[in-house]
Amino acid sequence: MLTASEKIALFRSLFRGREEVYPRRFQNKTTGRSGYAPACANEWVRDLCNKRKTKCAECPNRRLLPVTDEVIRWHLTGVGPSGNEFVAGVYPMLLDETCHFLAADFDKDGWREDVQALASTCREWELPYALERSRSGNGAHLWLFFDEPVPASLARKLGASLLTATMERRPELGLDSTRGHFHLNVPLPILFCGQSTMEVDLLCPKDRLAIELDGPQHLNDPETYRRDRQKDALLQENGYFVLRFLAEDVGKRLDHVLDTILQALQSQRRPQQ
């Protein structure tokens, strides 16, 4: 049986992220809202912390706390230094944009079948993995740990390839539990080409981001090209940000496609000046 110190060392060897900072779970007792925020030594310290008026990122007294064995001990026991509940998170991407692990989160209807289907793909590809029940009990996480840090873009490409292979083998699943932000083939109530609705390939309603995947005919046929430009203009008039990708790039340059989508989401979520 492992000692407490050995368990902490094992945990840190697997869930390796940034060492100079870590997020801690919080829950607002009034609203019930929960989330994670960087752990700060001066949080709620009188005359140093004024969260109600100053954002943490703009606070001149911010002093981020590093990951230590004691922090991991509190996390594993669930009890912090003051006897209160303690849950630590991890920032997996290092400053050089590499990471030590990849996680897939399943928390919608059908999560049991979906995570087992992905695990089956991992076994077929001879990829060791670990399964974990989520905190709520109504979901699961699948973890892949790397022997050495790999580029985060490569890790994302691996994850996308695993999901694609899983859906090709088990299309009846559809991996509904991984969905939530983007929806496929969404009809919008916008008049277009004589129709009462306009369909977009992928839509993120929350951030009003529309994504179109184009085959070669979209560039080679003048009429199709003009129709696409009209569609883009109408989407923009209705408050949507539009991205277009060549369908072949999703397979050949997936890392570039994902990075572009992430940058667009960050731009959409950035507060307007």
Image (cartoon, rainbow, N blue to C red):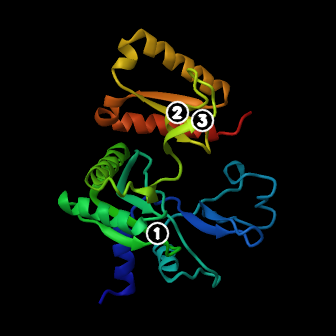
Q: Earlier in the sequence, mark 2 or mark 1?
A: 1
Image point (43%, 51%), residue name? 93
Residue type at numbered disc 2:
Glu
Query: Is the residue 263 above or below the residue 145 in the image?
Result: above
SS category of the residue bearing label 1: loop
Sort mark 2 into few (<14), some (14-19) or many (20+) by Cα contacts within 10 Å: some
Asked whether the residues under the numbered discs 3 and 2 touch, taking CB atoms below 8 Å apart as contact, a structural biologist would say: yes
**Label drawn at residue 188:** 3
Q: Which numbered disc, 1 or 3, marks the residue that appears first in the sequence?
A: 1
The quadrant of the rendering that contains the C terminus is top right
| Helix, strand or loop under label 2 | strand
The disc placed on residue 213 is: none
215 sits left or right of 127 in the view: right
Distance Cα–Cα, label 1 vs label 3? 31 Å
Q: Is residue 66 left or right of residue 52?
A: left
Q: Mark 3 belongs to which amino acid?
A: Leu
Residue labelled with disc 2: 199
Q: Which residue is mark 1?
A: 139
Where residue 249 appears, x then y in whole percent? 33, 30
The residue nearer to you, when weighing 242 against 94, is: 242
**Rendered image quadrant of residue 174:** bottom left
Assess disc 3: are there few (<14), some (14-19) or many (≥20) residues with their C-alpha within 10 Å of its C-alpha.
some
